[in-house]
Amino acid sequence: MFLKRKSGGFMKDNIDDKIIENMERKKDKQRSKKKRKTEEASAFQSVFDKYTYENIEKIRRKGVIDRFIGILSAGKEANVYFAISPEDEPLAIKIYKIDPNNTRWMKSYIYGDPRFYKIGSSTHKIIYTWARKEYKNLKRMSKHSIEVPKPIFILKNLLVMEFIGEKNGTPAPRLKDVEQVSNPEMLYNEILDYIWQMFVEAKLVHGDLSEFNILYYKKKPVIIDVSQAVSIEHPKSLFFLTRDVKNIMKYFRKIIPNYDFPNEKNIIEDIYRSAFHKNKANESL
């Protein structure tokens, strides 16, 4: 860089510091934009093979969706995308990754559930079963008045469901990301009621319930990510129920430390006893 003496000091020839700062800011924005596009492309490519494209076209031709917009979130088992229905309603499309690494832990939630048997051992068949499992779980929970995204259509590893959020595509936040809920005591009791309804009425247990898979929408909880939910006949159903209750109690003890919480063991025993008596009553009919 050339320097010249002027008024007893040195100055940069034809270069202004502010121009350099502006150029650096623009470069930072470009790098950030490029990184975001790369991440979105990676998330897109991780689930989009030619069969997925074909399946999206199939559900479009069936009139399930009108427009496929873009990605909402990326996860280890699936990515969720935003779409618009022919009636101009927002939709969420969950596309499960055909990844053999995922099938290893999925099996423990499939095997032992009497609703699913003879599923095969191939990666595709296990993933398709996993998608169908979430569809069935959402349908059953919705039927028993548990707030979940309503399932709309299932095709292989594509699940179309109700979008929880604003019509412009802004999703409802996870409970984990909400800084302050309006009535945490009421919210706690609503979620505990959902756990009870799942187990006693729907005969299901979520198995992985926490603030990470509960949306907070219009001051109400909405349960999501129910693919791993199992029938209460599953040999580990009591273990999963215990884990769900403990996770929820742990979260709410942090945000309402002075609340008089009931004993975890009593909650679990009450849920289990209620389910037992309901089954006995149904058997006598």
Image (cartoon, grey):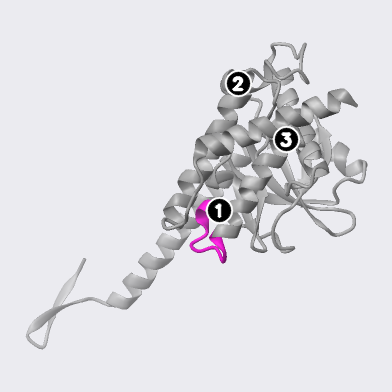
Report if residue 126 lies within the magenta region.
Answer: no
**How many numbered tags mark residues here?**
3
Residue at x 76% of width, y 14% of height: 117
Q: Quadrant of residue 161?
A: top right
One can see residue 144 in this view: yes
Residue position marked by numbered label 1 in the rendering: 175
Q: Position of residue 263 (x, y in %)?
A: 49, 41
Q: Viewer-nearest of labels 3 and 2?
A: 3
From the viewer's perspective, tell me whether residue 242 is left or right of residue 12. right
Across and down, in percent, residue 191 comes to: 62, 48
Q: Indicate which disc, 3 or 2, sits on the residue closer to the N terminus.
A: 3
Which type of secondary structure does the marked residue at label 1 adopt? helix
Vertical placement of residue 112 versus 133, above or below: above
**Residue 245 percent across, percent down from the top left:** 55, 39
Left of 178 or right of it: where is 89?
A: right
Which image quadrant for residue 74? top right
Q: Is residue 173 visible?
A: no
Question: Rounded to the nearest whole Å, what is the CA distance between mark 2 and mark 1?
Answer: 26 Å
The numbered mark, 3 or 1, whose residue comes first in the sequence reads: 1
Residue 177: say if magenta: yes
Per the image, label 2 sits on a secondary structure element best described as loop
Specify start and end residues of the magenta stretch as a single range. 176-184
In the image, farthest residue toward the left: 8
Q: Quadrant of the C terminus?
A: top right
- Residues tagged 3 and 1 counted as in contact (Cβ below 8 A): no
Q: Quadrant of residue 164?
A: bottom right
Q: Residue at x 49, y 49 (%)?
A: 261
Q: Which residue is mark 2?
A: 236
What residue did someone put label 3 on?
Answer: 200
* Kind of residue sitting beneath label 1: Leu
Q: Nearer the viewer, residue 276 or 176?
A: 276
Q: Position of residue 227 (x, y in %)?
A: 68, 32
